[in-house]
């Protein structure tokens, strides 16, 4: 299926192809390595079929994200998108049934996007990164670029505010660049990624109580 669609999309004139791959496995006998193998097999077969750049969109539930991205790069991926957003289930306690949760992302989703954009940008050079999920305004876009993103995807913000938000974001970015004396994106892209800050462990911190127990 992936091969046929990829070939058709290239023939239709696409400049690049993004593969949105997600597999939710709940079997207790499932080997986690099979998720990695699934991604790798798909990228290999698609790259053998088309000549346009192929980008893999991944989720957060793939175990060692840097190792997966590096493996995808070795097997021909031109870039990755981090991350895809999935259906969010919720429970209606009055009607006792499963319902859809929040459809759109929010600002609280941005932290993981920044963390992994910065880590992958610093640890797996040579692969393009598109940051996705939790990006709602121009400041979010700049944060992702500073973390090392080559591109930024906005979806929920367009549904919420309409297409005019794009021109607003671009205008604000240009104003910020003028104020900070940057002539182009390349001058600050990745400036604060994992490899370019004095304490890269800042991106690895995950223990809440260890770092916030002294807050009022």
Image: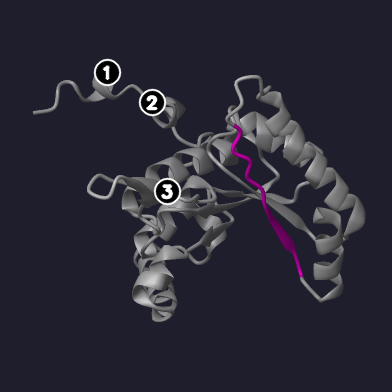
Would you identify the image quadrant in which residue 166 lies? bottom left
The x and y percentages for residue 24 are 59, 38
Where the C terminus falls, by quadrant? top left
Question: Residue under circle 1?
Answer: 210
Q: Residue at x 42, y 64 (%)?
A: 156
Q: Nearer the viewer, residue 166 or 156?
A: 156
Would you identify the image quadrant in which residue 105 lies? bottom left
Answer above or below: position of 159 versus 182.
Answer: below
Which of the two marks, 2 or 3, is nearer to us in this view?
A: 3
Question: Which mark, by number, is residue 88?
Answer: 3
Question: Residue under circle 2?
Answer: 205
Answer above or below: position of 197 versus 99.
Answer: above
Mark nearer the N terminus (2 vs 3): 3
Q: Are marks 1 and 2 in contact (CB under 8 Å)?
A: yes
Q: Which residues are magenta?
A: 15-25
Locate residue 14 relative to residue 24 in the image: left or right.
right
Mark nearer the N terminus (1 vs 2): 2
Give neighbour class at mark 2: few <14, some 14-19, many 20+ (Cα, 10 Å): few
């Amino acid at each position: 299926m992936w091969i046929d669609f990829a070939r058709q999309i290239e023939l239709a004139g696409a400049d690049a192809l993004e593969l949105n791959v997600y597999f939710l496995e709940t079997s207790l006998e499932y080997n986690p390595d099979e998720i990695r193998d699934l991604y790798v097999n798909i990228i290999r077969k698609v790259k053998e079929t088309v000549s346009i750049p192929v980008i893999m969109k991944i989720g957060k539930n793939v175990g060692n994200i840097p190792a997966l991205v590096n493996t995808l790069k070795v097997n021909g991926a031109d870039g990755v998108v981090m991350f895809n957003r999935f259906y969010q289930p919720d429970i209606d306690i009055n009607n006792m049934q499963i319902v859809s949760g929040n459809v759109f992302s929010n600002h609280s989703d941005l932290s993981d996007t920044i963390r992994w954009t910065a880590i992958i940008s610093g640890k797996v050079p040579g692969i393009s990164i598109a940051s996705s999920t939790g990006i709602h305004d121009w400041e979010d876009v700049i944060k992702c670029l500073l973390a090392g993103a080559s591109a930024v995807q906005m979806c929920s913000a367009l549904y919420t505010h309409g297409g005019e938000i794009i021109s607003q974001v671009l205008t604000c970015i240009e104003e910020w660049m003028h104020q900070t004396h940057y002539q182009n994106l390349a001058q600050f892209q990745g400036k604060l990624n994992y490899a370019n800050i004095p304490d890269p462990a800042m991106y690895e911190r995950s223990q809440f109580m260890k770092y916030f127990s002294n807050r009022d």
